Image: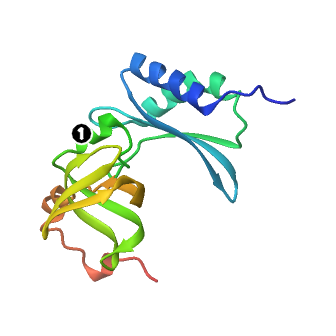
Amino acid sequence: MAKKQLTMDSLRAFCEVTAEQMGLEFCDVLMEKEPQGRYLRFYVDKEGGMSLDDCERFHHAVQPKAEAIDYDFMEVCSPGLDRPIRTDRDIQKALGQKVSVHLYRPENGSKLFEGLLESMDAETVVLNAAGGQLSFPRKAVSLVRMVPDLSALDDETEGIVIESDELPDE
């Protein structure tokens, strides 16, 4: 039986309302082609992080509407600590934070730059980097992504010693 056609924009709008009603932040929905098939992926977040129960609740809420889309697998997941910066809300959260900017073509021998996000709009991405201020035309940028601060993990693992006899055999 053929599935009814629903546009991704309509599904996105439905998800935004649903997530808000559930106290979640809807980040994006993407159709991603992989060797196993077409994945319909919903990216949802909340303050303090997502739990498996949160993902399951959102999955059950959107699945009936998503059935109108042609896909092979459906996933609900968190965008992660290194989430891409796409929406105005993402930009506002990322201002002053460390980000990586990925370019389509190398500039000064590199396609990857890191620094604090000063501004980002439809025209330009501006970073405050170690070498000074960097500005990139938005059309030259393939991806802007948060750089997670993992320094807290250093504190948690400090002083942990693993004896060689505790390591698995290879």
Residue 104: percent from left, percent from top:
44, 65
Residue type, numbered disc 1: Lys
> What residue is rendered at 37% in x and 48% in y?
80
Q: Is residue 31 above or below residue 115?
A: above
> What residue is rendered at 41% in x and 77% in y?
168
Q: Is residue 111 above or below residue 84?
A: below
What number of labels is visible?
Answer: 1
Residue 122: percent from left, percent from top:
35, 44
Quarter containing the N terminus = top right
Q: Is residue 113 left or right of residue 83?
A: left
Task: Looking at the picture, tell me which residue is in the foreground, 117 or 68.
Answer: 117
Q: Is residue 137 above or below residue 18?
A: below
User: Which residue extends farthest right?
Assistant: 1
Residue 76 visible in the picture? yes
Q: List the residue tagged with mark 1.
A: 93
Q: Is residue 5 left or right of residue 137?
A: right
Residue 73: percent from left, percent from top:
66, 43
Residue 148: percent from left, percent from top:
26, 55
User: Which residue extends farthest top?
Assistant: 21
> What residue is rendered at 48% in x and 20% in y?
18
Q: Is residue 57 left or right of residue 85?
A: right
Residue 42 visible in the picture? no
Label 1 crowd bin: few (<14), some (14–19), many (20+), radius 10 Å: few
Task: Looking at the picture, tell me which residue is in the foreground, 11 or 40.
Answer: 11
Task: Looking at the picture, tell me which residue is in the foreground, 135 or 112.
Answer: 135
Disc 1 on helix, strand or loop? helix
